Amino acid sequence: MSAATVSAFIFDDGYTENGYIAAVPGIYPALRFEFRPMLIKEYLEYAKVSMKLEFFEDRREMAQALTKKLVRWDLKGRDGELVVFKPDNLLRLKLTLFDKLFKVVAGNVAPDNDPEQGDVSTDADDALVAEARKKGCTVAELRENRDAKN
């Protein structure tokens, strides 16, 4: 396993990732967000507390954990303004969106491929992915820049 691969799966607290959840027509819109991945210790602390809670209280605990991990998102209300990510607002999301968001932040599932970012998982090697992350761009943008220079 290359160093680029290892760095993609082992992170320090404070590391942020971009996430995308594809729209499910008739249920919820697409959601782009930035988050700090939940560390194993944080997940286990949540799990320990949640085992003692009833269903809704468990969801409130999940919303609290998400509030601590989300950095930004593009979810807008009916007024067109960004929705503040606080527990009460998170608990008003459609259940399937709420669950997927939590699973992505907890590291239980991967975010969906963002059509605006290109699919880096199928056609990029580890070194190219690492370089794109380091430069804060997509693999597609990195390739375009390289092609433009040639």
Image (cartoon, grey):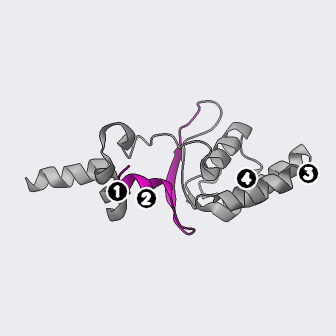
- Image coordinates of residue 97 in percent, x first then y, are 66, 41
Residue under numbered circle 2: 7
Mark 4 or mark 1, which has the lower sequence index? 4
Corner quadrant of residue 70: bottom right
Query: How many angstroms separate mark 4 from mark 2 (CA)?
Result: 30 Å
Q: Is residue 88 visible?
A: no
Specify the segment rendered in magenta. 1-24
Please name the residue shown 65% across and 33% down the image.
Answer: 27
Q: Which residue does the numbered mark 1 point to in the structure image?
A: 130
Residue density around tag 4, few if under 14, some if 14–19, many if 20 or more, within 10 Å: many
Q: Would you name the residue on which mark 3 appears?
A: 52
Do the residues bearing badges 3 and 4 touch, measured as CB atoms within 8 Å?
no
Name the residue that disc number 4 marks. 90
Q: Residue at x 63, y 58 (%)?
A: 38
Q: Position of residue 18 (x, y in %)?
A: 49, 55
In this rendering, position of residue 108 left or right of residue 127: right
State the SS at label 1: helix
Label 4 residue SS: helix
Q: Which of the two discs, 3 and 2, sits closer to the camera? A: 2
Separation of residues labelled 4 and 1 (CA atoms): 32 Å
Whether the residues at callouts 1 and 2 have beta carbons within 8 Å, the answer is: yes
The span from disc 1 to disc 3 (Cα, nearest Å) is: 41 Å
- Which percent across, then down, holds residue 131? 30, 58
Type of residue at label 2? Ser
